[in-house]
Image: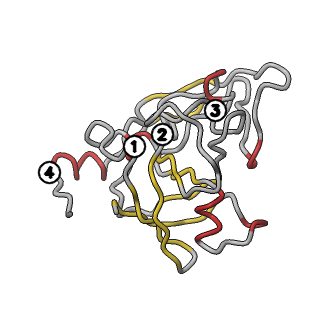
Amino acid sequence: METVLTCLEIAEAQNCDPSGQVVGTQPPPGKCNQENNFQCCKEGKVYQTFTCSPHPAHPAVLTLNGFAQGEDGGGASECDSQFHDNNTPIVAPSTGWFKFRNKKRCMNNIAITGNGRVVTAMVVDECDSTRGCDEEHDYQPPCHNNIVDASKAVWRALGVPEEKWGHLHVTWVDA
């Protein structure tokens, strides 16, 4: 099924400027989850926030995320209030992509192309581009507006060697 975008939606996606900022605070000792090479907020550093994301045809950055309880993904997923097995191909796109048309992508699949392969993964959560540097977000900065946080299963399916997991330029479409 093909998605038809209005001229306003296309214009907004192409002009996805920062919508605000978050000022970093020093995380309490041992409270910033640095699993999967995540960075902790730095005291006084200004981080941009975004309510929008570029059009999906724009290249994205695939990042590694843990979706099980206690991992770097934070709380239960936004779509179903559950934690998920990282051996399942699941993702958490940036806020603008996640909230497109009132969370239309929740529990639906996207097809991710990277490393010469394509993998289908279910959207279960949001990579929050509007907030961060707080306990709810494991004292990590807000996501950038072009992120697709992915489980280990997605990285494996794309054939990326484990030592290179972390950041990969990809494209994606609704599947």
Q: What residue lies at 55% left-to-right and 41% top-to-bottom?
A: 143
| Label 4 packing within 10 angstroms: few (<14), some (14-19), many (20+) | few
Separation of residues labelled 1 and 2 (CA atoms): 6 Å
Residue hosting label 4: 6
Residue 136, compared with residue 142, is above or below; it is above
Q: Residue 126: which disc?
A: 2
**For numbered disc 3, what is the local secondary structure?**
loop
Picture quarter with the N terminus: bottom left
Q: Pick the residue in front: 76 or 42.
A: 76
Q: Pick the residue in front: 84 or 48.
A: 84
Mark 3 vs 1, N-terminal side: 3
**For numbered disc 4, what is the local secondary structure?**
loop
Residue hosting label 3: 74
| Label 2 packing within 10 angstroms: few (<14), some (14-19), many (20+) | many
**For numbered disc 2, what is the local secondary structure?**
loop
Q: Residue 20: horizontal and vertical position, in percent?
A: 45, 28
**Mark 1 or mark 4, which is nearer to you?**
1
Separation of residues labelled 1 and 4 (CA atoms): 18 Å
Q: Which amino acid type is marked by label 3?
A: Gly
Separation of residues labelled 3 and 4 (CA atoms): 34 Å
The reply to whether discs 1 and 2 touch (Cβ–Cβ < 8 Å) is yes
User: Image quadrant of residue 115?
Assistant: bottom right
The reply to whether discs 3 and 4 touch (Cβ–Cβ < 8 Å) is no
Q: Which amino acid type is marked by label 4?
A: Thr
Q: Residue 98: which disc?
A: 1
Q: Residue 144: horizontal and vertical position, in percent?
A: 52, 44
Determine whether, in the image, residue 54 is placed left or right of residue 136: left
Q: Pick the residue in front: 51 or 112.
A: 112
Mark 1 vs 2, N-terminal side: 1
Q: Residue 154: horizontal and vertical position, in percent?
A: 58, 62
